[in-house]
Amino acid sequence: MRKYSVFALVKEAMRSHKGWEPHWVSPEPRSSYDVIIIGGGGHGLGAAYYLAKEHGITNIAVIERGWLGGGNTGRNTTIIRSNYLYEESMDIYEHSLKLWEGLSQDLNYNVMYSPRGVMMLSHNTHDMQSFKRHINANRLYGIDNEWLTPEQAKAFCPPLDISKTARYPINGAALQKRGGTARHDAVAWGYARAASDRGVHIIQNCEVTGIRRGPSGEVTGVETSRGFIGAKKIGVSAAGHSSVVMQMAGVRVPLTSNPLQALVSEPLKPIFPCVVMSNTVHAYISQSDKGELVIGAGTDQYHSYSQTGGLQIITHTLDAICELFPIFRRVKMMRQWGGITDNTPDRSAIQSVTPVPNLFVNCGWGTGGFKATPGSANLFAHLIARGEPHPLAAGLTLDRFRTGRLIDEAAAAAVAH
Amino acid sequence: MAELATRTLPLAGAYGGSPAVQLQPARPAARISLRARPDAVEALSAALGLSLPTAPKTSATGGGRTALWLGPDEWLVIDEGDSGLMQATAASGAVHSATDVSHRNTAILVSGPGASQALNAGCPLDLSLKAFPVGACARTLFGKIEVVLLRTGPDAFRLECWRSFSDYAFGLLAEAATDAEI
Amino acid sequence: MTTHRIKGAGRLTPARTARFTFDGKIYTALEGDTVASALLANGVHLMGRSFKYHRPRGILTAGPEEPNALLDVSRDAARRQPNVRASVQEVFDGAIIRSQNRWPFLSFDIGGFNNLLSAFFPAGFYYKTFMWPREAWAKLYEPIIRRAAGLGVAPKEADPDHYANRFAHCDVLVAGGGAAGLTAALSAAQTGADVILVDERAEVGGALLFDTAVTIDGKPGYDWAQDVLRQLKAMPNVRVLTRTTVFGYYNHNFLGLVERVTDHLASPDAALPRERLWQVRARKVVLATGAIERHMVFANNDRPGILLASAARLYLNHYGVAVGSKVGVYTAHDSAYEAAIDLKRAGVDVVAIVDCRAKPGEAVVSAARGLGIEVLTGYSVIDTAGHLRISSITVARNGSSNNRKIPVDALLMSGGWTPSVHLFSQSRGKLKFDAATERFLPDVHVQDCVSVGACNGTDDLNTLLSDAAAAGGGALRLSGEVPFAWTGGMIGAAEGAGKDKVVKAFVDFQHDVTAKDIRLAVREGMHSIEHIKRFTTNGMASDQGKLSNMHGLAIAAEMLGKEIPKVGLTTFRAPYTPVTYGTLIAHSRGSLFDPARKTPLHAELVKAGAEFEDVGNWKRAWYFPKRGEDMHQAVNRECRTARTVAGVFDASTLGKIEVVGPDAAKFLNLMYTNAWDNLKPGKCRYGIMTREDGFVYDDGVVGRLSEDRFHVTTTTGGAPRVLHHMEDYLQTEFPDLKVWLTSTTEQWSVIAVQGPKAREIIAPLVEGLDLSNEAFPHMSVAECTVMGVPARLFRVSFTGELGFEVNVPADYGAAVWKAIWSRTEAMGGCLYGTETMHVLRAEKGYIIVGQDTDGTVTPDDAGYGWAVSKKKPDFVGIRGLKRPDLMREGRKQLVGLLTRDPAEVLEEGGQIVENPNQVKPMTMLGHVTSAYWSENLGRSIAIGLVANGRARMGETLYVPMKDKTIAVEVTDMVFFDKEGGRIHG
Amino acid sequence: MLLIHCPYCGEDRSELEFRWAGEAHIARPDTISAISDDEFAEYFFMRDNTKGIAWERWRHIHGCGRFFNAIRDTVSDKFLLSYKAGLPRQPVPGSEPAAAPAVEGGVA
C-alpha cells in the first residue's frame, strides 16, 4: 500500500490528488477462508489485521452486515482510558492503551490519538473511596491515575464549576493523563486499509444468516445474504448483535443490547481541554477537533436494536452537564444518535472459546468498546490463532458465569450505603 | 408528665404561585396506605364508611374521608378530620395491610386557571378534564419525584408527595406557575 | 449608505425602527426584520467565513437551512449566543452582533490563507499526515487545527435566562404552517379535535410569504393565511405556536418542540422563559414541512451576493429589500423566473436568466422575456468573480468553449426543491426514490402520521389543498390558482464542474466540501454514502446537509456508476435544527436539578451547627464542629463523648418498609438469608439480604411488632431498590402469599441515643414502657408514647453502647429531638454525625454494605456466615451461594487491620500486598474498605477485604502508598469492648 | 419516549412511569437449591436478547406499582400486547387461532 506522509500529500497536491489508491479492496467472497470474522467494526477489522501481522494468517474474510465501522465504532463518544479496577480489566485496557499510543504509526493512518487526560469527578465520600481504590490499584499495576483536589481539577479543566453551593459539590477527581480521545472512523478505516494490504478480504453489505456445523459440531462456514462461505475458524465480533449471531450456533450468552445515546453541540472554538466523566451526576463530555462538544450518558433502560432512544435520556444528560459546566447552557445540540451496546451482568467483556469447536466470541464490551479496540482485537487474534486465550485475557471466559468468578466493574461503582 | 411534643410541618411558610396558579400547602391530614385483595373490599369499605374505588384512576369520598385507587390492591385513604383510620380498618375483620403514612406524605393544593399547565411542567399525564375528570387520581411523576395527583375541582388539584420531596415539588410548582397563562 | 429598501414593497411598517451593531458598526432595521434582511437593506452581504478555507461568505438563504451567516448575538455579557442564523434571528433594539471564525476582521481574515493552500487540504488530508513525530499530533498539530476549526465562541458566563417545559397532548399535531399545514389544521379543528399547529417562523404562511402570485379561496395567499390564522386562534380547541420548531419525532408519536419566546424582544418580561420546551404526545401527526430550495453546484458558487432564488423573493416581497441592483439568475427550475419577474417589476435591473436546460417551461420564459429580461436557455454559469462580493459571472452555451462575462452584484440560483422528509425519517418512515423527479418521498408511514404538500412531493396547489383537508379529517374544501406550473430541477454538479474538473464547486458551504472532494472520497474506496459523508464531512455541519445531501449523493452515484437509491441516503437524526441545552434542561437547574432530601430534623441540625454530606440525594449531618474545631477534632470529641456519656444521632434516612400480613414471616424467610418465624413480637434481629447470585445486597435490623407486622430497616441507599426487589418476588414468584409492603421511610423521625447515659436521657420522655435491661433488653422493640406521641422504641445499637432508637411520627421529630438534646447536653453528652457513626461502628467491627461490601462479597466473606440459615429449604440466594467460585478457598474476607505505627491512618481504597517489593504489576490481596483514627482506642483502626484473610490472623501485610509503604497486622474485626458487655449496660 | 399500555390501569402511560424488568416467563426453578451450576447460570444470566418480537417484563413503578408482561418488537419498539402477571406466555395478537386462552390484558 502507498505510504501516507506529508511528502505523499505534497506530491499528490501537484496533480490534484488523482493518484491515491482505494483504502481497501472490496472483492467478491471466495468459497472459503481459514478464518471468518463476523463484524466489520474496529474489533473485527483489528483482529484480522493482527492475525495477519502477528500470526501470519492472511486467508481471512471480515464479513460486515452494513458498511465498515457503521455499528458502535461509528457511534461512540471516542473516550480512551485504562484506569479500571480489577486486574483482568487493567490487563486488557492497559494493553489497549499502549497499542493506542503507537497505532497511527503502526497503521500509517492518523487515528488522532489525543492523550488530553480523562478526569472522573468525585461528588461524595463514596466516590472518593471508589476512585482512591482505583488509583491505588492502578498505581500498583503501573497505570497512571492521580487524585486531584477540586482546585487542581478546576486548573486542569477551567470550565468546571467547583463552587460549594452546587447541588453535588465536587470533592476531588481522579485523572488519567494518558487517557483521552481518538477519531473513531479513522480506527476502522486505518485497520481496514492495513488488513486489506496484507491480503485480508473485506466484504461489506453481507449479512450472516446462519452458522453451518460439521459432524462433530465444529463450525464449517456461514450462510450469508451473498451465499455460503466456508471457514475453519469463526470469530464473532458483532457487538450489539452478538446474541443474534451466537444463537445461530445454538450458544446462549448473558447479554442485553441497550440503546446508548450521545449528542454533539454546534462547533465551537476550543473551550474544553480534556475528557470529564461523572458517575454520580451521570454524564461525560469532551470536545472534538472540529469543535463540537461530544456528550454521552447512560443507556436507555429497555433492550432494543432500534439505535434510537428517548428524549428524556438526552434531557437528563444535559441537566448533569450544565450542572457541572453552567456556561454551556446557551450552547445548542446539533445532532443526537444512538448505538446498541451489548452489556454483560458484570459490565466486563467476554473474549472466549465457546462450547462449539472453532467458534470464538468477542463481545460484551458495553460502553467500553472503543477504548478497548486495539487491545481486544490484538488478544482476540491470539485466541483465534492459538485456540486458547492470551494470559492478558484469561479472565474473560464465558464460563465465569457458571462458576461465579465475575469481574464486577459495575458493582465497584454502585451507589453506597 | 413530660412536656408534649408539637408538630413542625413541612412547607411551613412556603410561598409561591402566580395570577394563573395559586399554591397552598394543605392542612395536616391522617393517611393510611391500605392494601388488600378484592375479597376484603366490602368489609373494609363498611369499616371506613365509604366504598373503596376498584376502577383505575378513580377516588371515592365518604364521611370526610377520601380513598384514592393507586393499584389493584392498593389505596391511599386521606382523612382531614379526626383520624381513627387504623382503628377502623383493624375492626373490619378482613385480611389487609393498613400502615399509617400521615407524616410520610404532605400535600400541596394547586388551583386556578393555569393549574393543569403548571402540573404539566413536570407531569406527563393528559390533565384535560376529558382525560382526567374531577375525582380522577393517579400516582405519577412530577419532574424528578413520584407524586399522587387528585383532581378536586375543574381547576383544582391536590398533589401528595413524600415529605423530603416537598421543597422540590413546591419549587417546581412555583417556577411552573409563572409560566402558566390565564 | 444607499438603502436597498424598495418603496412600497414588503409587509414591514417603515415607521417602527430598531438599531443594532454588526462588528461595531451601527445599522438601522425595521421592526420584523431579521438580521439578514436588515443587513441586506444596508447593502451588506459579507457575514461570515467558511469552516476550513475561511472563504468570505454571504447570506445564502432566508430560513433555518442557512449554512453561512452564523453570527454571535448578545444582549449583554452573560446573554451571548454563538452560531445564530442571521436569516432566523429577528433584530431587537440594542442587539450586539459579531461575525465569527475570522481574525482580525471579517473583511481581512488571516485564516483566508488556507484558501490559498487549499490544494494541500483535500477531504481527509488529516488522516494522511501529522503522524511524525509520535507526540506531535497532540502537542503541535491538533491544537492548531482545533483553533482554526469551530465557528462561534462558547459563552464565558453562566446563563442567567430561565427556560420552561410543558408536557402536552393533542388529537392532531400539524408540523408546518404553510398552505398545507393551515388547511389541515383548520380542517381538523372544525371537527372539534384538539389541534396544535406549529410554525418555525414569526408568521404563518410558509411559501406563501414569498410566492405572492398564489391565490387561495380567491384571496392572495398571504392574506388567506393570516385570515385562517385568525380563525384558528379564535377556536378554544386550537393552540397555534409560531417561532416554534418541531425538532424531534420520537417513539409512539412523541414530539419535541422548542418555542422561542423572548429572543426577538428588546426588553423581555423577566418572568418569561427565554425558550419553552414542548413535549407533545399526539394521537395523529400531519407533516406539512414543505420543501427546501437547492443551490447549483458550479465553480466558485460561494461568493457573498450569491443567494437562493426563493430567498431573494422573500427578502423583496416580505421585507421590501432588493438583494442587489444588477441581479443575475442561474437556474435549472422554473421557480427562479418568478424571483426575476418580482425584482424586475420592483424596478431592479435583472441582467440575465441563465437556464442550463434546453427547454424550460415556456410560460415562465415568455413572461420573463415579456419584461425585457434576457433569457439564455441551454447555457451555464461556469465561473464567478469578486472577493468580498460577487462582481461578475462567466456564462457559456452548454458544450461550447466561448464564454461571456456579465457584471452582476447579486446572483440568484435554484437547483429545484428538496422535499423536507427529516421528521418523516425520524418517525422511522420508509422513503422511496421518485426517479422521474429525482426526489426522496415518504412511502410507508410507520407511526400514525401523514405527509401533505411539498414534503410529500405534491406540486399541484389544488391537490395539496384537498390532501391537507383530508388529512385534517374535516369537511373543509378549498381551491386556489398559481400563475405558472413549475417544472425542472437537477441534482449533482452543473456544467463546468464535472468529473475531470478541479474547480471549487461547493456542495457543503459551511464545511467547504466541493464536488471534487466527493469524487476523491469515491476514488479512495469510500463507496457507501455514510463513508463518503464521514470522509468529506459533507452534511455534518450545523445545517446538517439540508442543502448538500442530495447534491453529494448525485455526484457520488455518478462516480460509482450506480442508481441514486442504490447508493443510499444518510440517516436524518433529531434535532431538525439545533436546540439550546438550557431549553432541553428547562426547570432541572439549581435547586430543581435534583431533589435535596432533608430529614424532619434538618432545621435543628443546622441550628446545632452541623456540616452536611451528600448520601445519594439525602443531605446527612456529617459532624458538629464547635468553636473552630476541624472535622478531625470534632469527630474525636464526638467519639469520646458518645462512649463516656451519650451521643445523639439522626438516623431518619435509613430505609423503612412495613411488611404486614399473615404470611409476613414466611415472606421474610424467603427474602433474607436468616430465619424469622422464630422471632417473637417485641424482638429484633439483624438481617442480611442477598440476590439470587449470593452476594450481599443490603442489611438492616428487623423488628417484629406483632404476629403479622414487621418493621424492616434497610441501608439509606438501599431503600428504593430493596422495596422494588421485594415487590418483584412477591408479585411474580410468590403471588399466593398474603402479605403487603409499604414504604415508611419518611413516616418516622428516628433519633438514635447511644451511650452509658442513654436510658437516663430518654426515660422521663417515655411513658408506658419499663426500660430496664430485664424488661427491655438489647434487640427489643415496643410501641409506647414519647412526649404524648405514639412512638416505636427500639433497643438497638450501631455503636456497641447501650442504645435506643426513638421513632416518632416525622412532624414530631424536631420537638422530641430538642427535648432529648437539651437533656443530653445537660449531662455533657453530644450530637454526632455520619463520620462519628462510621468510626464507632468500625470500632465494633460492624460492616457497612456498599463500603465494606461492593456486590462481590458473600455473607461468609463478610464474617456473617452465621446469619445464613442452614435449615431453611429456600431463600433468595440459596443456590447462588453454592457456586464454585463462592465456595472456593482463598476468597477475600473482611478482617481487621492494625497499622504497626498506631498513629498512621490507612487510606480507604489502599491496596494490600504480601510482598511490597515485587515488581509491577503487583499481585494484590485486597483493599482497605474502612480506616479511621479511633479516639477511644488512641490509635488508628481499619477493616479490609483480604484474600484468605481469616487464615492470616497475626500476619504482617503491606499497603504500598505513593510515598511510603505501611505495614499492617491482620487482626479480628472487633477492636473495642471485645466481650461486648457495654451494649447490655 | 415509549407509550406503554398498563393492563392494570387499562390506560396508555408515558415510559417515565415505568421500569423495564428484563425478559418474561423465566420462572424461578421450584427447588432452586437442587439445580446444577449450568442450570443456575442459564436461569440467572443467559438471555435471548431477541432482535424482533420479545416477551418482557415491565413494572408501572410510578403508577399502579404492578409488574406485568408485554410483547414488543425490539427493532421498531412497537408494543404488540400488554398482559397481567401470572398469565402464561401470550401469543402475538393476530398470529394464533382463537384456541389460545382468553387474553386478559388490553391491546397496546
Image (cartoon, rainbow, N blue to C red):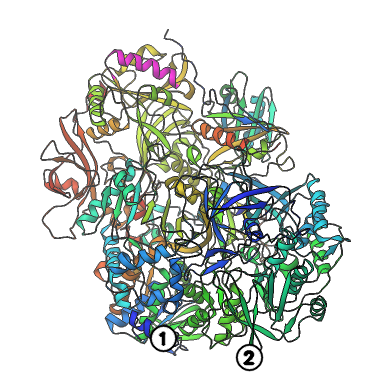
Q: Position of residue A246 (x, y in %)?
A: 44, 71
Q: Position of residue B71 (x, y in %)?
A: 61, 40
Residue C898 falls inside the magenta stretch: no
Whether residue B94 is visible here, answered yes or no, is yes
Q: Position of residue B13 (x, y in %)?
A: 54, 23
Residue A14: numbered disc: 1
Q: Position of residue C789 (x, y in %)?
A: 47, 17
The quadrant the N terminus of chain B occupies is: top left
> Could you tell me the amino acid type at mark 1?
Met
> Could you tell me the amino acid type at mark 2?
Asn
- Residue at 54% across, 61% down: A308
User: Which residue is at the far top?
Assistant: B1
- Residue at 42% across, 43% down: C670
| Residue C442, picture quadrant | bottom right
The span picked out in magenta is C813-829
The residue beneath circle 2 is C402
Q: Secondary structure at mark 2?
A: loop
**Of residues A376 and C255, the one drawn nearer to the viewer in this rendering:** C255
User: Which residue is at the far front?
Assistant: C1
Marked residue chain, label 2: C
Q: Secondary structure at mark 1?
A: helix
Is residue B41 toward the left or the right of residue B6 in the image? Answer: right
